[in-house]
Image (spheres, helix red, strand yellow):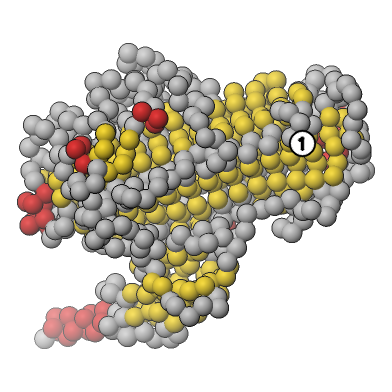
Amino acid sequence: MRLILITCLLAAATQAQNPVTPGRFHIEHPTLLNLGFEWAIQGDANRNATVEVRFRKTGTSAWRNALPLLRIGGERSYRDREAMTYTAPHGFAGSILNLEPATSYECEFTMKDPDGVTGQAQQKVTVSTRAEPRPYSGGRTLHVYPADHIGPKQEPSFIGLKAAYYGEGRGDWTAVRMRKAQPGDTILIHAGLYRPERYNYVDPLSAPFHGYWSLSLKGTADKPITIKGAGDGEAIFDGGGNSKLFDMIASSHHIIEGLTFRNTEVAIFAGEKEVLGAVGLTVRNCRFEDIGVGVWTEFAGSSDFYIADNLFLGREDQMRLIGWNQAGQRSAGIYPSHQLRSFFAIKVYGPGHIIAHNAVAYFHDGICISTYGPPEEDPERQASSIDIYNNDIHLSNDDFIETDGGSHNVRVFNNRGINAAHNGYSAQPFFGGPVYFIRNILYHVPAGNPLKFSSAPAGIMVLHNTFIGEQGAREPYSNSHFRNNLFLGKDIPNRGIMAWAHATPQFSSDYNGFRPNRDVKNQYTWIVKGGKDSTYSTLAELAAATKHETHGIELDFDIFENLTPDDPSQRYRVYHSMDLNFRLKPNSKAVDAGVLLPTINDNHTGRAPDLGALETGQPEPHYGPRWITWKPFYR
């Protein structure tokens, strides 16, 4: 009798926790194209609450549906080597995608739960997307020339950047700042070579000994401080092998545009963890070459960067794809492991960053979120609402894009990655989610997987990607959802085409296309934590057993207009995007085989959305800088 009473009390207590109680509603930093939201909750122990989302332009009458917010919470991420554990707080999070810049939207969120909602079940907010940063037209124009300039000058003129930015000063007097630039000023850098004589006490460019410029003034969102090429020829900042060129810690609202950075370890450093960072930094239309790192911040309070239309060229081998570790041996393989001559092109932390239309080549990693560790509680100090899109990444010795360390609403979409030695798109880990991987392309990843989901990331949306490679990773990840993707195998011996490794019961996979490897029995592996791994020879067998992929299909490379797989026996070979065609052949099995995803494929052609990154009958995205119409480093 006592046991029955205890059982009844426990059941009643559990049932009492099933209704959902809405908590804090947080609007994340807007980006140009997307809006992110978080809604904390209590209760909903049986996880059957939902949040429906709809939106419309302010002043219009027609509502549009968006993807529902993702239910998150309770997922545990860990990394044993760093003794790191983190459990995602309970709530909902998600994005309204593919909006217009500088536009106001009314957004409506409705929470529902069959067990009841206690509290405010609806949120209505008006939020505007950001506008692209622009120089202020009403400020002063200051003209900077190199020390060896000969000829007329436009006034007011200065020798070197320091003189225009802080005022004159050499030797010990470089620390004196008597004539600072003002918010709204535009500093035009005229053509020439700006290479400090850093061992000269009276260096004419005012950067003695360290050879870099500290740029820590404060512009405003309306009146940024702009440092840009004057347009009369290439303006080159050469570090002469120094540690960094621009140190922008503590700066606010700067635009760096049309400059060349070279011959330095870190071109633009903008934040140290737990020290200080930068706000509103724009780096646009610049060229980076012979560098170790392009743009870098580790500070949680760094926010709202716009890094777009740049060309980043590192120092790694341009003719061979060499990873950082060959088969577990630091100096084994046909070629030795590389020595990390260039680390990454871009790494950021903090909210609201936009990284778009960059071309990246010859780095260890391409574009990264800082592997910061578990996020801080303050949502203003988390890596959330970050957009990484339309970047063209060629030859990474590790991964193309790493979202490692992100918290919520990181959107990785319309990127193209060709040649990565280890893995393609990474979440190692992601803390709660969602992280969106949408319409990305991947080709030639010989040693790893298209997706690196390790250290138990949580909250993963994998939608409409074209991956030439097997997803064989077996480390667990949580709350993951796959739709409308293409995974095509390359006939690697003894390797199946797909493995799902679920750490929690919340997952789903359907409407995907797979090209199984020849002569492999176990093509599909279904892994559920705490249960027994299950393997299947065909997609039909997997669907019958798991009730997932009931609309998935098996297909082959004949779905493409003209594409063959990379050769698994030539792991060091370098392929070029200009030789690869990822467009689908009309009427192939992948055409009209997908499912509708609001705000992602509403504009599909045909009866239904196509599988993969490219929709038939629609233009291919422009990958890389919009000012480049040719491929500068692919040959």
The C terminus sits in image quarter: top left
Give neighbour class at mark 1: few <14, some 14-19, many 20+ (Cα, 10 Å).
some
Give coordinates of residue 296: x percent, y percent.
59, 40
State left or right for residue 395 relative to residue 303.
left
Residue 601 placement (x, y as % from top left):
35, 59
Q: Residue at x 26, y 58 (%)?
A: 606
Give the SS element for disc 1.
Answer: loop
Taking the spot 76% from the left edge, 31% from the top edge, the residue there is 232
**Image point (33%, 74%), residue name:** 50
Could you tell me residue 584's position as x and y percent? 27, 43
In the rendered view, would you say 455 is above or below 43? above
What residue is drawn where x is 27% and y is 83%? 114
Q: Position of residue 98 (x, y in %)?
A: 46, 60
The quadrant where residue 138 appears: bottom right
Q: Pick whichever, 129 or 371, lies toward us.
A: 129
For residue 176, above or below residue 121: above
Question: In the rendered view, does 351 fall on the left or right side of 264?
Answer: left
**31 sits left or right of 622 in the view:** right
Residue 279 versus residue 293 in the image, above or below? below
Give the residue type at disc 1.
Ala
User: Do we see residue 374 in this rendering?
Assistant: no
